[in-house]
Amino acid sequence: MNRAEREAAVRRVMGARPVPVPPELYPDAVRRGERLLRRGRLARRVMWALLCVAAVVFGVWAAYAHPWVEPPSQTTPPVDGW
């Protein structure tokens, strides 16, 4: 099927009369859509909570470990008694 035939087939499909949708599908679609929205909202809330917990844990660790301070050198012993 070349490009012209595909375009003609698409035009036929687009020009055809739409198929009627059964009315009993509407409540199911609304219910599924609401469920997807709730799940997405819950997932975002959980991710934000995890991000906040990680930030607090990092802050507590940084306050305790002082990672910005250079550790003392272990290559030479301290010089005393001069």
Image (cartoon, helix red, strand yellow):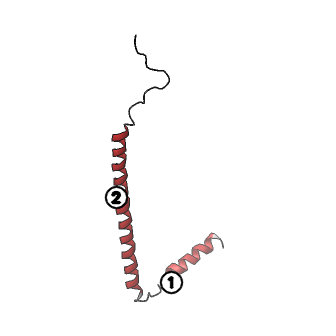
Q: Which mark is residue 7?
A: none
Q: Is residue 59 above or below residue 18?
A: above
Relative vertical location of residue 45 with respect to residue 13 in this rendering, above or below: above
Residue 78 percent location from the top left of the image: 43, 19
Q: Which mark is residue 49?
A: 2
What residue do we see at 37% from left, 54% from top? 51
Q: Nearer the viewer, mark 1 or mark 2?
A: 2
Q: Secondary structure at mark 2?
A: helix
Against 35, is 76 above or below? above
The residue sitting at the right extreme is: 1
Q: Residue at x 33, y 49 (%)?
A: 56
Q: Amino acid under label 1?
A: Ala
The foreground one among 4 and 28 is: 28
Q: Label 1 vs label 2: CA separation?
A: 50 Å
Q: Considering the numbered disc 1 on the image, is that residue within a helix, a strand or a loop?
A: loop
Sequence-first disc among 1 and 2: 1
Name the kind of residue labelled 2 in the image: Ala
Q: Position of residue 63 (x, y in %)?
A: 33, 40
**Quarter occupied by the N terminus:** bottom right
Can you give x and y, in whole percent of width and height, for residue 10 in the image?
Answer: 55, 76
In the foreground, 6 or 65: 65
Taking depth in this image into account, of 81 and 44 the one nearest to the observer is 81
The reply, left or right, for residue 73 in relation to residue 7 is left
Q: Quadrant of the C terminus?
A: top left
Label 2 CA crowd tier, 10 Å (few <14, some 14–19, many 20+): few
The tag on residue 16 is 1
